[in-house]
Image (spheres, grey):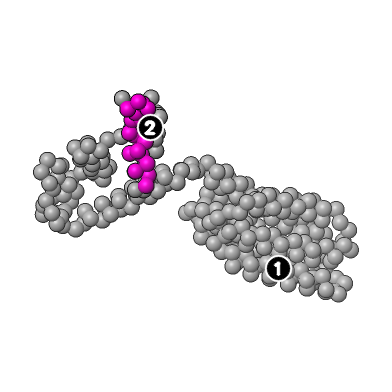
């Protein structure tokens, strides 16, 4: 079981890991760039950053997650938050800091909840929980009075970019790992796939019939397949398949039905034989062609 920054993955889509890898690199650039900003630029930059977080949530929803609905809801919520930050005419940092704290609190709470939920199936669940705890702590800091200073808001935004970069990069690498494992799966030819499906179905029926009482005796000369009173099989399913296949080959040989195995090389004396007829007209044509040609003198 994998996770997509906030949800376990059950499937992957081609190229999705590349988008998340790009998102992780973009978050790193954001985390470095905001620390170089002037305090007066915070209100114009924080809104687009939260909107970018909404886009990333949409990407996770498209990655085939079991909790795609949760990522979709977060995308809508963060898009509304970023829009409010853009249209706000607050000249100070109070509204910006409080909305950044709101984003971090929600994002961190979701990561902690999903990380704990997948602790038995995902080997990186502890990393998810740690990122969620740090995001929640940053959210409390952003919503507190000390965050009303411009320098504190810049530090919070920088830390947000680094944490989200780690989350998206890990998600992208895990998606790529799953895609590589999927390509390593052996694809059987259609006839072998059908044979495997039939074998599996027969094995399931065989195991199910062992729970019921046997309804007939084993024929003479065959290995007993079930106890007469308990209905428990005394031979494995594979042994039964081998035995019945050998019996079928023996019956076909007694009936005079013989022939080369499929894929065996053709013998020289059978290479020039005409094809077998499939209609009465073809049979008559074959019979006429088999008559010897007599010489013109009647000899």
Q: Residue furthest front?
A: 297
Name the quadrant containing residue 243. Answer: top left
Q: Residues within 10 Å of mark 2 (few under 14, many from 20)?
A: few
- Mark 1 falls on what kind of element? helix
Q: Image quadrant for the C terminus? A: top left
Position above or below: 77 against 200: below
Give x and y (percent) for residue 122: 52, 52
The stretch drawn in magenta includes residue 218: no
Relative horizontal placement of residue 124, taking residue 270 as reference (left or right):
right
Q: Residues within 10 Å of mark 1 (few under 14, many from 20)?
A: many
Give x and y (percent) for residue 116: 52, 59
Name the quadrant containing residue 6. Answer: bottom right
Name the residue at 63% across, 60% down.
62
Read off the residue under disc 2: 273
Tag shown at residue 121: none
Name the residue at 78% across, 73% down.
84
Name the quadrant containing residue 177. Answer: top right
Give whichever of discs 2 and 1 has the lower sequence position. Answer: 1
Give x and y (percent) for residue 49: 77, 61
Highlighted magenta segment, given as a residue range: 281-298
């Amino acid at each position: 079981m994998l996770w997509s920054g906030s949800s376990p993955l059950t499937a992957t889509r081609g190229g999705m890991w590349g988008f998340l890898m790009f998102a992780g690199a973009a978050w790193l650039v954001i985390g470095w760039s905001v620390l170089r900003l002037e305090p007066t630029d915070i209100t114009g930059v924080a809104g687009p950053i939260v909107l970018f977080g909404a886009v990333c949530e949409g990407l996770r929803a498209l990655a085939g997650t079991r909790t795609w609905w949760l990522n979709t809801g977060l995308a809508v919520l963060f898009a509304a938050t970023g829009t409010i930050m853009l249209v706000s005419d607050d000249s100070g940092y109070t509204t910006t800091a409080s909305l950044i704290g709101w984003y971090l609190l929600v994002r961190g709470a979701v990561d902690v909840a999903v990380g704990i939920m997948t602790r038995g199936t995902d080997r990186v669940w502890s990393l998810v929980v740690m990122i969620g705890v740090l995001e929640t702590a940053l959210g409390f800091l952003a919503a507190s009075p000390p965050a009303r200073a411009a320098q504190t808001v810049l530090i919070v935004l920088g830390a947000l970019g680094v944490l989200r970069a780690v989350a998206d990069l890990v998600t992208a690498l895990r998606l790529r790992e799953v895609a590589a494992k999927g390509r390593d799966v052996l694809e059987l030819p259609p006839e072998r796939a059908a044979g495997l499906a039939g074998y599996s179905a027969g094995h399931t029926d065989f195991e199910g019939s062992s729970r019921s009482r046997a309804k007939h005796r084993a024929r003479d000369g065959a290995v007993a397949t079930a106890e007469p009173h308990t209905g428990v099989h005394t031979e494995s399913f594979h042994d039964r398949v081998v035995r019945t296949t050998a019996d079928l080959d023996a019956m076909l040989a007694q009936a005079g039905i013989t022939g080369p195995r499929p894929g065996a090389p053709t013998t020289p004396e059978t290479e020039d034989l005409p094809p077998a007829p499939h209609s009465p007209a073809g049979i008559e044509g074959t019979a006429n062609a088999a008559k010897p040609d007599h010489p013109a003198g009647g000899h």
